[in-house]
Image: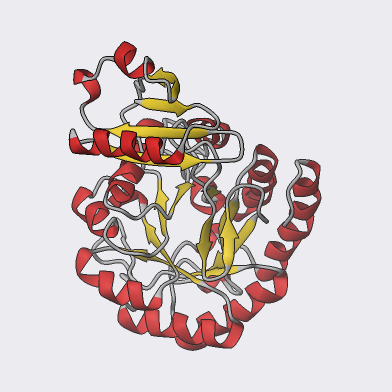
Amino acid sequence: MIITIKKGAPEAEVKELITSFQERGFEVNDSQGTDYHILGLIGDTTSLDEKIIAANPLISDVTRIAAPYKKANRMFHPEDTIVEVDGIRIGGKEKVAMIGGPCSVESEEQIVRIAKEVKHAGGTMLRGGAYKPRTSPYAFQGLETAGVEALLEAKRQTGLPIVSELMDIEHIPEFVEHVDLIQVGARNMQNFSLLKALGKIDKPVLLKRGLSNTIEEWIMSAEYIMAGGNENVILCERGIRTFEKYTRNTLDLSVIPIIKEKTHLPIVIDPSHATGNWKWVESMSLAAIAAGADGLIIEVHDTPDKAWSDGAQSLKPEKFQTIIEKGRVVANVVGRSL
C-alpha cells in the first residue's frame, strides 16, 4: 500500500503515523523527495481500510499495490536508485558503465594484461570469472581463490573495480572482502538461500536474469535481496532461451523501459552471452545504450581463439574501444554520457 503525505504535513505527526503502522506489524518505507513524500507499507495490508486511512488529515492519497514486489517497486521509490561500486555510480542519469574483461581468469599475467587493455579502451570496470558455472562437469571450472587473487592484482595495477560471479554461500566472505560488484549468474537467479544471504551483506549485487524467467520472477529475486536489507541491486539482462538457435540466447531489450517503469533499479545489458557471437555484440551494445541501459558488461579477450571459455563471443580490446567510441555518440543523443 502506498500512502501519499500532504505537502507541509507536520514532521512530528508524520512520525507518529509511521509508528502507528509499525506497531501494527507493518514495515514502513519512508521515501521523500522535493515534490513528494510517500509511505510504502510492506506486509499483509488486507486488514487495513483505505477509506479510514484516507480520512487522516495528513494524507492526500492511498493506493493499493497489486504487484508482489514492494522494495523494488517504483511506486515505493519514485526516484532512480544510484548504486555506487567503488566510486563508480550506476543508474539514473549517471555515465553508462562499461564493464569489460574475459569470461574466465586464466592466469594473473593474463587478467592483468587484459585489464590494462580494457582501461586503455575506456572501460570503467573489470569483469572476470574465478568460479565458473559450466554445463559440463568436465569443462574448466575456474581458478577459484587464485582467480580472485589475480583479479585483485589487476585492480592494484589499473584501479578498475572488480565484477565476478559468486557461486555458493560459502564463498560470500571471500567476495565481500575482495570483489566490488558481486554477480549472481543466470543459473542462480532463483537460488533463494543465496539471495537471502546476499541480503545480509553491504555490497552491491549484479543480478542476472534467469535462462527462461519472466520479468516479474526476476524482479522478485531482486526483492529477496532487498528484503534482507541490501538495496544495492543492479539488474542484468543477458538474453533468454527461446526456440531460436541462430543466437546463443535471445536478447530482450524491451526489458530496459519495462524495468525503468516498474522499478527504480539500474539495469545493465550483457550482449556477449545474449548473442554468443562477437560480430553481433556491437550492434546490440549500441541498441542497448539507445534504449536507456545504465551499463554494458562485455567479454573482452586479446586472443579469443585461445580463450579457455566463450572465445567465440569475446571482443578483442580494439573492438571494445570502438564500441565505447560509438557508444559515446549514441549516449549523447539520449541525454547520457559514457
**Residue that appears at 46% across and 70% down:** 128
Does the image show residue 74? no
- Height in image: 89 above or below 257? below
**Residue that appears at 72% across and 68% down:** 318
Q: Percent x, y for residue 72? A: 40, 39
Judge left or right: residue 92 versus residue 186. right
- Height in image: 145 above or below 307? below
Q: Quadrant of residue 290?
A: top right
Camera-side residue of 280 and 143: 143
Q: Percent x, y for residue 274? A: 50, 46
**Residue that appears at 34% across and 55% down:** 230
Where, quadrant-wise, is the C terminus in this rendering? Answer: bottom right
Camera-side residue of 48 and 81: 48
- Height in image: 65 above or below 256? above
Does the image show residue 33? yes
- Height in image: 336 above or below 62? below
Where, quadrant-wise, is the N terminus in this rendering? Answer: top left
**Residue that appears at 54% across and 36% down:** 260
Camera-side residue of 65 and 13: 13
Judge left or right: residue 190 versus residue 215. left
